Image (tube, rainbow, N blue to C red):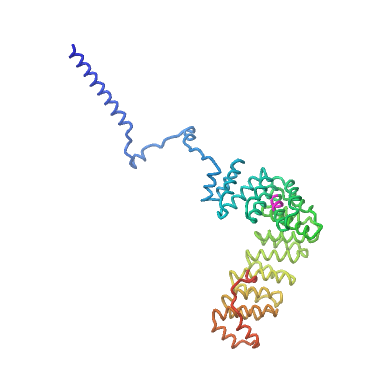
């Protein structure tokens, strides 16, 4: 009896072992991955995810914090500041506190503080202005205040101007002006027509007040054109009464217009006829020369300009043209009728030519009509020439048909080590 029980238990145990082995091998075969080969990858269909599965598979967006943005700013300051605008008010203030804690030698500090104060100014401009006083550097404090005021004026110009009327009264004139211009820049960005009217209504009883008003009007016009409002700016200026204010703003209008469309600006100036002042024409050609000096020179040839305009415009054209093409600029100068108005343009050309062809530069210098200018440029050429090629310079001195005392001055001339306003 006992033997039967033992045999029965042994049988049950063996059976259970067999069942366990069967299920174990089945599970193992099901869980063992198929060898990965290119053929297997190509044969297997791509898994199809339902919309719900896709949503669950997406990683959650990292939480935006002041600390994470401060860390990001070490690699990409611009991106960190862009993301900072998405922080809530508390987050912006926390990041600002961390920016203030940076050492003043950290290049990120002033930029972060300025931009963050501008962000805080959207909701709490007076708080932002108070915090700006803790920046440290006078220059950075001024820039931060301008950023705050520009933002404030874009949101609430009436409040910003009312604050300025009392709070800026005792500021130094230069600081007062820069902060007022920041207000009008922000105002013009939001509502250029209202900003223009507000600037026109400014008190202008003294010379300083009149100058500030003109600056404010020019700031509005510049901002308006930069934002694509050329037509509106033009209409506002044209509707003004004739006078110094209108003339000044017309020059500013044409200058900004010519910076991106000189041909269009030139066509507009032509429609003004005799009403186009010398300043307007000079500003047009000055901007045009930076973009295309050859085209500016060709237009200049077609116009009948007074001596002042010719002097300013030709100098601007040559100054820019000689940066790229000495031969063409010289050819244009040679084609112009003799005129004392071209003396400054010849000086500008001579200054450039002295670096490349001193012998030719000396000839140009000798052609200048104004005696003081002629002597100055001859000495400039001589100083550099004898330094770079003393033998050629000495040959010139021996054969030149000039007075002995002038030869002596040229031999004593020193080489120029700095730039000149005629070359800039």
What span is in magenta? 182-186
At a point 56% along the width and 86% down the height, the residue shown is 395
Q: Is residue 271 left or right of residue 31?
A: right
**Of residues 91 and 193, the one drawn nearer to the viewer in this rendering:** 91
**Of residues 172 and 46, the one drawn nearer to the viewer in this rendering:** 172
Q: Is residue 149 left or right of residue 112?
A: right
Q: Quadrant of the N terminus?
A: top left
Vertical position of residue 292 compared to residue 98: above or below: below
Label count reads: 0
Vertical position of residue 4 compared to residue 267: above or below: above
User: For the view shown, which residue lies furthest in the top direction?
Assistant: 1
At a point 66% along the width and 60% down the height, the residue shown is 259
Q: Quadrant of residue 90?
A: top right
Residue 136: x and y in percent read: 62, 53
Residue 240: x and y in percent read: 79, 56
Q: Quadrant of residue 382?
A: bottom right
**Of residues 62 and 38, the one drawn nearer to the viewer in this rendering:** 62
Residue 418: x and y in percent read: 60, 72
Vertical position of residue 304 compared to residue 155: above or below: below
Residue 340: x and y in percent read: 71, 76
At a point 67% along the width and 51% down the height, the residue shown is 145
Q: Is residue 98 left or right of residue 303?
A: left
Q: What secondary structure is the stretch in magenta mostly built from?
A: helix
């Amino acid at each position: 009896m006992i033997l039967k029980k033992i045999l029965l238990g042994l049988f049950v145990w063996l059976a259970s072992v067999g069942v366990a082995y069967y299920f174990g091998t089945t599970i193992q075969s099901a869980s063992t991955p198929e060898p990965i080969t290119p053929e297997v990858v190509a044969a297997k269909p791509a898994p199809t995810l339902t919309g719900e599965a896709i949503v669950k598979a997406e990683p959650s967006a990292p939480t935006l914090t002041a600390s994470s943005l401060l860390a990001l700013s070490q690699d990409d300051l611009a991106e960190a500041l862009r993301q900072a605008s998405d922080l809530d008010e508390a987050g912006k203030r926390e990041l600002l506190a961390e920016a203030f804690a940076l050492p003043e030698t950290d290049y990120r500090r002033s930029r972060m503080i300025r931009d963050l104060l501008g962000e805080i100014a959207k909701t709490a401009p007076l708080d932002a202005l108070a915090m700006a006083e803790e920046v440290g550097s006078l220059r950075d404090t001024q820039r931060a205040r301008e950023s705050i005021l520009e933002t404030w004026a874009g949101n609430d110009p009436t409040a910003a101007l009312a604050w300025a009327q009392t709070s800026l009264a005792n500021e130094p004139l230069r600081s007062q002006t820069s902060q007022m211009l920041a207000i009008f820049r922000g105002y013009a960005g939001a509502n250029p027509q209202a900003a223009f009217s507000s600037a026109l209504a400014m008190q202008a009883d003294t010379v300083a007040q009149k100058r500030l008003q003109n600056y404010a009007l020019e700031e509005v016009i510049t901002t308006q054109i930069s934002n694509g409002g050329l037509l509106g700016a033009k209409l506002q200026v044209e509707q003004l009464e004739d006078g110094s204010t209108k003339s000044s703003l017309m020059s500013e209008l044409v200058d900004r217009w010519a910076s991106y469309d000189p041909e269009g600006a030139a066509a507009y100036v032509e429609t003004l006829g005799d009403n186009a002042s010398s300043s307007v024409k000079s500003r047009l050609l000055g901007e045009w020369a930076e973009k295309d000096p050859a085209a500016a020179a060709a237009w200049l040839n077609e116009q009948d300009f007074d001596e002042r305009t010719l002097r300013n415009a030709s100098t601007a054209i040559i100054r820019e043209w000689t940066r790229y093409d000495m031969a063409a600029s010289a050819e244009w100068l040679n084609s112009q009728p003799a005129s004392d108005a071209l003396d400054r343009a010849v000086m500008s050309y001579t200054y450039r030519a002295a670096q490349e062809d001193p012998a030719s530069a000396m000839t140009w210098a000798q052609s200048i009509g104004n005696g003081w200018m002629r002597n100055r440029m001859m000495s400039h050429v001589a100083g550099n020439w004898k330094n770079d090629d003393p033998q050629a310079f000495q040959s010139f001195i021996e054969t030149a048909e000039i007075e002995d005392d002038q030869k002596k001055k040229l031999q004593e001339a020193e080489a120029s080590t700095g730039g000149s306003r005629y070359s800039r």
